[in-house]
Image: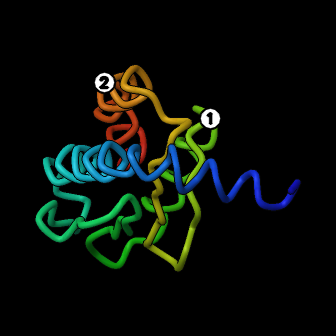
Amino acid sequence: GVLAAPGLIALEHMTKRLKTDHENARILAEAFSKYDIFDINPDDIKTNIFFLKFKGEDETIAERFYQLLKENDILVYPLRKGELRFVTHYDITECDMSNFIKLLPQLVMEAVV
């Protein structure tokens, strides 16, 4: 019963939430696509998980961007050099999305300096 409960919640409630999570991932990808430092196509985003790649050979920009995200409590996974893994999920609210998109220009500017 204890182990089955999270599975039941996932099947009965979280599947309805997946559409929102997928849309949020696409919204983030669209926001990233407005900047030349990122190599991302929003049309390629089909789920709530996506990989953000950085253009060019300079890995210091990717590392600085990752550190800036971390300092702002935006947790992502550094997959490979110059690539970050983003996942949208039920803990990410509409307000979180809006705040991040507003913060993104500042983060990009600080990363490329």
Residue located farthest toward the right when viewing the structure as drawn: 2
Residue beneath the point at 23% across and 52% down: 26
Instruction: State the SS at label 2.
Output: helix
When asked about the image quadrant of residue 41, the answer is: bottom left
Residue beneath the point at 16% across and 54% down: 33
The numbered mark, 2 or 1, whose residue comes first in the sequence reads 1
**Where does residue 19 sit, x and y in percent of width and height?**
30, 49
Q: Which residue is mark 2?
A: 102
Relative to residue 47, is residue 111 drawn left or right?
right
**Where does residue 17 sit, x and y in percent of width and height?**
40, 43
Q: Amino acid at mark 1?
A: Asp
Q: Which residue is mark 1?
A: 73
Instruction: State the SS at label 1.
Output: loop
**Dot 2 and dot 1 residues touching (CB under 8 Å):** no
Q: How crowded is the residue under tag 1: few (<14 C-alpha within 10 Å), some, or many (20+)?
A: few
Q: How crowded is the residue under tag 2: few (<14 C-alpha within 10 Å), some, or many (20+)?
A: few
